[in-house]
Amino acid sequence: MTSASATAASDFGFTSTIYCGLGLDYRRHLKCALSLDRSLTAVDSTGQLKQNACSIHSIRRCLAVSSIRLRHDKPTQRNHPQASHTAVMSAPSDVFKSVLGKHRPDPKTYEKLFRDFHRHPELSFAEKETASRIVAHLKTLSGDLDIRTGIGGTGIIAICKNGSGPTVLLRADIDGLPIEEKTGLDYASKHTMRDVDADNAVKPVMHACGHDFHITCNLGAAETLIKARDAWAGTVIFLFQPAEERGRGAQAMVDDGLYDAKKHACPIPDIVLGQHVFSVIRAGTVMTKSGPILSAADNWRITVFGKGGHGSMPHLCVDPVVIAAHIVVRFQTLVSRELPPDEAGVVTVGSLKAGETVNVISDQAIIQVNVRSVSEQYRKVMLDGIKRIVQAECDAGRSPKPPVFEFLDSYPLTVNDKDMTQKIQKSFATYFGERHIISDKAASGSEDFQILASSVGKPSVFWGWGGAEASVYDKHEKEGTLNDIAVNHSAYFAPAIHPTLETGIEAMTVAALTFVGKDGN
């Protein structure tokens, strides 16, 4: 390293190289020297930055596990001597910029496509028109794409072979939610349809979780990579998955023979990649994390029993509402009293139903509970705790028979492969620069994405990108009201079309080229 960097050993026994993004000389600036020392105390044994070193610097983890990048947002002095420095990371920046510079898709085409997907959402396992639109667009991109449909219901793969090399799978989910849209957008959904996967009732439908963005960006990445075949070698699979919102779409595709050579014969990928738009992240920003990035989720229906009767004679009855109420309250102690303070967990009772009228004590109550965790160890702690609490409260409330536990569905813990994540972080840092953020916390949301990789024993990487319009985000950030931005699954969810589409297309393209690009990989 040059004079703009410093190297020191941390207490954890590895060497960390720290350099300043502006090339400032640490040895001539006391605050920089102090920051260097402090930053080493903010790194754990894997090289993951745990906190900012000081208020002067914005510190982020670099792709070399033991390296930290130090950047001055605003230099505090004008007389810092400038010095050249060698970047810690090397990435195929030329191929990224070349491919996206020459082959960037037309924004108007993809905005029109996005609006169409948003205006016509479909519920899980009923995405027939959505699938038809996807296939129609894929066919316009190349005549030699190997397109296979009807996988796991409405799932699609499009295989682009381009010589020998790694195989990369790019995944997008395609289903909407049973929500009535209230955004007031000129392309808002007014669509209704029968929920054939649930209660068969007719429901309003909305793309309230950004799957319209996911579809459009995967198609945009497909166009980019197909046009830029001279810049990469290998196989890229563009996969469009149904029913993510029900947690069963990925498994349905696998169970239907996605990778079965005698059925759909999708090539086994070396890496599976996916992304998700979030309305509470600034548009134009991409966010990555190594290790656990999304929580596991388990959904249960629990029936507790009582002895029904007249509301005026509770002493002759066993009230299941009282039992259920105690259960719901006691559930709240699972996270606060049974998980360590630094371990994330969520227990949410989304539904509690009992009885039909005011003066009748019901003979049963039904609780539906959602449990989220970011480690298998504490996932078990919470699930075991739920069963223990329910049984104990039923015993205490004199329930006449044991409770019934019905498993509804679950989402696996989404864990990004460490080595593969580092490669993508290196590429994102090279291409996006300051628009790439490395997070140190897993999100409480859940996905079935990883099943597409774990079912064949392959690694995967999943990241988020922002959809909050810059002016809106900055205003809320300044006022401390970021929580007022409509989040995913809200009837008011409305990420900015631009630059959200462009960023999603760029991120998926850069991630794919990280593994199949010809230069610097």
Image (cartoon, rainbow, N blue to C red):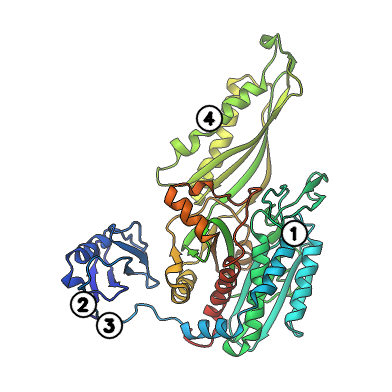
Q: Quadrant of residue 24?
A: bottom left
Sooner in the amino-acid sequence: mark 2 or mark 4: 2
Question: First in sequence: mark 3 or mark 1?
Answer: 3
Which label was assigned to residue 84? Answer: 3
How far separated are the C-alphas under marks 3 and 1? 52 Å
The answer to whether residue 148 of the structure is visible from this angle is no
Question: How far apart in space, not on screen, are marks 3 and 4 (Cα)?
Answer: 60 Å
Q: Label 1 is placed on what type of residue? A: Arg
In the rendered structure, which amino acid carries the disc numbered 2?
Pro
How far apart are labels 2 and 3 at the CA level? 10 Å
- Secondary structure state at the residue bearing disc 1: helix
Q: Which residue is at the front of the view, 513 or 100?
A: 100
How many angstroms separate mark 4 from mark 1 (CA)?
43 Å
Image spot of residue 224 (x, y percent): 63, 80
Label 4 with label 1: CB-CB less than 8 Å: no
- Secondary structure under tag 3 reads loop
Circles 3 and 4, Cβ within 8 Å, touching? The answer is no
In the image: residue 188, left or right of residue 275? right
Dot 2 alpha-carbon crowd within 10 angstroms: few under 14, some 14 to 19, many 20 or more: few
Q: Quadrant of the N terminus?
A: bottom left
Identify the mark nearer the N-term, 4 or 1: 1
Q: Position of residue 362 (x, y in %)?
A: 73, 21
Q: Earlier in the sequence, mark 3 or mark 4?
A: 3
Residue under circle 1? 119
What amino acid is labelled 4 in the image? Answer: Arg
Badge 4 crowding class, 10 Å Cα cut-off, few under 14, some 14 to 19, many 20 or more, is some
Residue in view at x 34 percent, y 64 percent: 59
Corner quadrant of residue 114? bottom right
Depth check, mark 3 against mark 1: the one in front is: 1
